[in-house]
Amino acid sequence: MKHLASSNSGYERRIRGGFTLIELLVVIAIIAILIALLLPAVQQAREAARRSSCKNKLLQLNVALQNYEMAHNVFPPGSVNPTGPILNEPKGYHVSWLLQILPYLDERTAFNKYDFDRGVYDPANKEVANYRIATLHCPSNPNQGHSYAGVQNDIEASISEDTNGVLFLNSSVSYDDILDGCSKTLFVGEFIEGNQLGWVSGTRSTLRNSGTRINSDDGKIFTGQDAYERRFTPEDERTDSDTPVTNTSNKKSFVGGFSSYHTGGSHFGIGDGAIRFLSENINQSVYEALANRHDGQLLSEF
């Protein structure tokens, strides 16, 4: 009998040692609060890592441009085409500056496979046009398109031979032509590509202006279906967005600005090799002066 009583007493103690429903709910609530507190920190750490990777990719583009200049004594043309201005449609030669720096991005195979006797929209070059290059994609970009474009002008202007950036239509800019100093001249920046004509196309898919504010609507309006497969007709005045295009009478020649999936601004590659994150609230006059290679303005800080 004593043994039985002792057993029952131990059993009761074990029962009393368990969690009650209220205690279990309290523990779950505490865990939920901890997760809610830690999740933003985890997300911030991930975004910081993505930003660091994005900066590194822009640095690779900067180095590739510098190596091209060392080999040819000029930077690559922003776009190669017999005539201008360049329209955002799949018609023309339209060889982009990104195609020309492939050997300096360790992409010699893609460079050799591309047929420079044909335009970028020729079926013979479609394999290269569809080739995804990791260096051209910001990890914060949820889409598959490329993320970087060259700076071709300070204010909004169509892609032509008389703009004031470093990369524009049939350009042949050398270091000597950058009168404002490389440390105060933007070369490359981020933009939301939106699956337009692709990284091979020397249109607004790879060239942009600083005439619109960073991350503004005009900097990121062109999104939608893959325009490489699209063929415009004279009656077709569609753009790659349902958002109305402002400040232009010709939607196909509108270039647009820079933008990113980072909060608060966008990364840019500077001519001296530095990578800077420019705030979307940067003084617009300063921002435009940074895109102009020879306007003579004095810029102490930006």
Image (spheres, grey):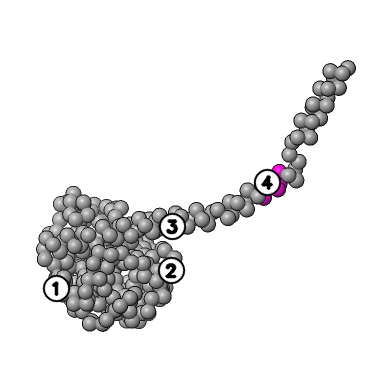
Crowding around mark 4 (Cα neighbors within 10 Å: few <14, some 14 to 19, many 20+) is few
Q: Position of residue 68 (x, y in %)?
A: 16, 61
Read off the residue under disc 1.
Answer: 176
Q: Quadrant of residue 237?
A: bottom left
Quarter of the image that includes the C terminus: bottom left
Q: Which residue occupies 30% across, 57% down? A: 57
Looking at the picture, which amino acid does disc 2 mark? Answer: Gly
* Boundaries of the magenta span: 24-29
Crowding around mark 2 (Cα neighbors within 10 Å: few <14, some 14 to 19, many 20+) is some
Give me the C-alpha separation between circle 3 and circle 4: 30 Å
Read off the residue under disc 2.
Answer: 264
First in sequence, mark 3 or 1: give its number. Answer: 3
Q: Quadrant of residue 55?
A: bottom left
Residue 28 is left or right of residue 114, and the answer is right
Read off the residue under disc 3.
Answer: 47
Q: Give the structural element (helix, strand or loop) at label 4.
A: helix
Looking at the picture, which amino acid does disc 1 mark? Answer: Asp
Pointers 1 and 4 in contact (C-beta within 8 Å): no
Q: Position of residue 284 (x, y in %)?
A: 36, 79
Q: Which residue occupies 79% across, 35% down? A: 16
Pointers 3 and 1 in contact (C-beta within 8 Å): no
Decide whether residue 76 is among the magenta residues: no
Q: Give the structural element (helix, strand or loop) at label 3.
A: helix
Give me the C-alpha separation between circle 3 and circle 1: 38 Å
